[in-house]
Image: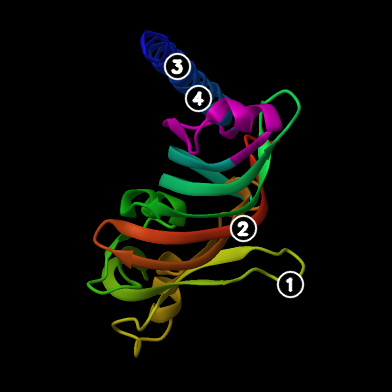
Amino acid sequence: MRFLRFIVIVAVVLGGLFVGADRWAVGYAEDRLAERIQSRQGLAGSAEVDIHGFPFLTQALSHELEQVDLKLTGVDATADGRKTRLSELDASFHDVKLNGDYTGGSAKRAEGTALISYEDLTKASQTGATLTYGGQPGKLKVTATVDFFGKPITRSVISTVALVDGKEGSGGKIVRVRADSVPGEGIPGIETAIRKRTDFDRRIDDGLPAGLKLSALTSDAAGVHLTLTGTDVSLAGS
């Protein structure tokens, strides 16, 4: 009886040591992977990594992870020489195959979301217009001032923000903002002048982890929310 009790105690102690070592290892791996991603993405903010599944050590030895969650802040997406900042990007990578030196890997599939604040969307427009929430999903309020025959004219319009296909051959998706209508359209030239300030397209696929694509968007009081999906998605640029 004492022998059995001794065996149980040893098993509990060894189990505790294994769990402790496993949790230390996964924490270390999460920190190193976050550093790698932050460096490669050139983030203005931070990167957080959460590796799922237990035990981690057996997953690491097989170079296969069940799921890796990634949270990024301050992601600068650059396309066509123009920069658009994503305030947040949250993604889940499934069935991750690690490379030989554990510095990255690729996931069979991934999905996530990203947020563009109205402040950052205003900067991305590069037209001098100010963008805010338009009062309902998919709508923005865009305010712009133009010089019309020497007189400054300020107009606020309700615009639709949508995701459209890029130009033929370029691939990817484009975030498009278009005014539904322009006050004073009856004045010759006024609509064209206002739309030069309020209407714009931005392609931001280039700033996302390789293989992760835009699939949908909507807007609310917080900003423009993007839905992301992909297959064979790169993790840490591997």
Mark toward the start of the polypeptide (2 vs 4): 4
- Say what secondary structure mark 2 lies in: strand
Q: Residue at x 32, y 49 (%)?
A: 119
Give the magenta part as a residue range: 41-65
Amino acid under disc 1 = Glu
Residue 150 visible (yes or no): no
Mark toward the start of the polypeptide (4 vs 3): 3
Mark toward the start of the polypeptide (1 vs 2): 1
Q: Badge 2: few (under 14), some or many (20 or more) residues near its Cα, within 10 Å?
A: many
Query: Dot 2 corresponds to which residue?
Result: 230
The image quarter containing residue 158 is bottom left
- The circle drawn on residue 168 is 1
Frontmost residue, 210 versus 8: 8
Location of residue 190 with respect to 31 vertically, above or below:
below
Q: Quadrant of the N terminus?
A: top left
Q: Residue at x 29, y 82 (%)?
A: 183
Frontmost residue, 133 versus 2: 2
Q: Quadrant of the C terminus?
A: top right
Amino acid under disc 2 = Gly
Q: Residue at x 24, y 61 (%)?
A: 221
